[in-house]
Amino acid sequence: MASVDVNGNSSALIQVRGLNKAYRRGGEEIQVLQGLNLDVDQGDFVAFMGPSGSGKTTLLNLLGGLDVPSAGTVSVAGDEITHMSSSKLTEWRARHVGFIFQMYNLIPVLTAFQNVELPLLLTRLSKSERRQHVETALSIVALADRMHHFPRQLSGGQEQRVAIARAIVSDPTFLLCDEPTGDLDRRSADEIMVLIEELVSQHGKTVLMVTHDPIVSARAHTLLHLEKGVLVEAGKAKPGQPIAAGSEA
Amino acid sequence: MKFRRLIQANLFRKKARLLLTLGSFAMALFLFAFLAVVREAFTRGESVASASRLVTINRVSIIQPLPLSYRDKIAALKSVQAVTHNNWFGGVYQDPKNFFPQFVIDPENQRKVMPELIVSDAQWDTFLKDRQGAVVGARTAERFGWKVGDRIAIKAPPYLGGQAWQFNIDGIYHGQKPTDDESQFWFQWEYFEQNVPPSFKNMVGWYIVKLDSPDGAQRVAKAIDTQFANSPYESKTETESQFAASWVNQMGNIKFLILAIGSVVFFTLLLVTGNTMAISVRERTGELAILKAIGFKNGTVLLLVLAEALTIAFVGALLGLGLATLAIPGLAAALNGLLPNLILSDSMLAAGIGFALATGALSGLLPGIGAMRLRVVNALRRI
């Protein structure tokens, strides 16, 4: 289970210690994250909520190795990523992180198959092995029959499912979802959340998700609130049992 | 090759832009090929000139003659193997547009001095026996449909009387190499002597001197000019290569002109394609950020952008050079023999491809470096 306790489980998959992030805007320093501590276990499903500007996306970027902290450390499966070189960090991201974004961010000129194949182009897999992996990932998101469609030929929900297939195709250590349902209607959002829950419950994936939507966050095992760069635990549930809606209050 | 589909998909993202950029490269390379063949045609004399041949002209100008009596004096010099003399005729065959160079030659020595222009012995023997005989280059013969045995008339220039001179085509010569000039028309010195006004008799246009070896070229040239110094017909002797270069320079600095035009074309192409690539990359900032987020390294992103630019450059170059290969023979025909045969050589094609790839690489480099330095977090924030 995820915990914001400083003395949390040392065997946690993700360990965050004393994480700070500050930006300079003009002459002023803006403190976005302040001394964050967090442990996330393998197979956990954590939702981050908070008002705009509270640092949710910044935290996700730091956990995903897209940004570097001003202070503190992030360790994933024993790898301390905060001091890695840019090149090492890129390699690390390719192996360990699957990204799911609000706007799907598919390459419009590539088919669903080709979009999902992208992370595998960085591996030593043969063409047939890549094909097998892509077909498996698209089957998991129930889009095997649309693999040759371009993003413009898919609905928003289907595009997001392709993005999820792209995120899981290389079997990453954990998934980072930034408002994965933010651009979808309720029905499509529910379908996406069911899919993410299946990734956690059936495929053992670890998921960290930022959302504004309390109904979406209620599906997570752990709900954490960010308030002015400080992390506050708002609710926990047993794995497989969502937090009751409204427990984040 | 794993990234082939990604590169291909990005190239075809905006088909109109792709076509226009390819068109820019194709036109630039077509122009490059045209300039290269014209430059080569102008300067071919230098490259095909024999190192062991000298050209002696009147010190004042090539249009001023030299006495025929110089021939034996030059031939007597040490290291001189053979001497021949030529005159410019400048006649008109049917129409002034049908230009080709006509030379009065010394049949006795022409083949000794110019062995690279080959005529069969049988045809040469016929030519030697026929005072109205002529030997013509294969290119000119083909141009006018002449064959051995034909009789033709060439109208002499006004200063030689302006009459029609009759010739029998006794032979057709071929060059040993494609760059050898196959456009000349040779006829006999004796025929010329019999028909020109008295002031032209016993006067030749220039001498061509064949040496034992190239080593003595400067010494023999000096010896010839010293011998005729302070005479009414002072001479100026140069190696054949120097003579060809100064001949071209009389028409202005052709090399510089062509180089200047070529440079402007490529610089403009660089700006056009550089701008196109920059726009293309800027439009895809978000996508490039995603690629970097999922693990594409900076170097890979740079290579993807460069690969696009190089592919456009390569395909555009092939189109332009292919078009030039088809068009240049027609262009040569349209020039009516004003220039020697226009030859688009393999080295010119290779240079064209090289220039195109260099331009492509330069045009892709700046946008590629920009893509490489893109901060994923900042780019994703803008999506």
Image (spheres, coloured by chain):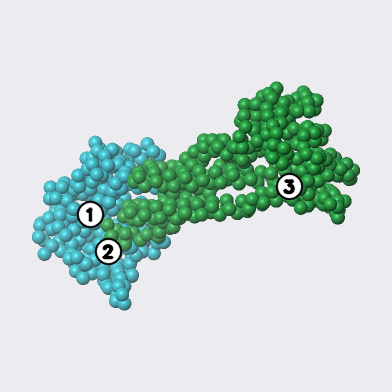
| Location of mark 2 (residue) | A58
- At label 1, which amino acid type do we have? Gln
In the drawing, does residue B35 fall left or right of residue A6? right
What chain does mark 1 sit on?
Answer: A
| Location of mark 1 (residue) | A102
Between residue B164 and residue B334, name the one nearer to us.
B164
Q: How far apart are marks 2 and 3 (CA)?
A: 85 Å
Quadrant assignment, res B365: bottom left
* Residue A222 visible (yes or no): no
Secondary structure beneath label 2: helix
How many residues crowd mark 3 within 10 Å: few (<14), some (14–19), many (20+)? Answer: few
Percent across and percent down for residue B156 are 70, 36
Residue B153, placed above or below residue B66: above
The residue depicted at 21 percent of the width and 70 percent of the height is: A228
Tell me the colour chain A is drawn in.
cyan
Say which label, 2 or 1, has the lower sequence index: 2
Label 2 in the same subunit as label 1: yes
Whether tag 2 and tag 1 are in contact, CB under 8 A, the answer is: no
Secondary structure beneath label 3: loop
Label 2 in the same subunit as label 3: no
Between residue A231 and residue B378, name the one nearer to us.
B378
Q: Distance between the residues labelled 1 and 3?
A: 84 Å
Whether tag 2 and tag 3 are in contact, CB under 8 A, the answer is: no
Q: Which of marks 2 and 3 is in front?
A: 3
Which quadrant is home to the N terminus of chain A? bottom left
In the drawing, does residue A137 fall left or right of residue B323? left
Percent across and percent down for residue B92 are 65, 35
Chain shaded green: B
| Location of mark 3 (residue) | B63
- At label 2, which amino acid type do we have? Thr
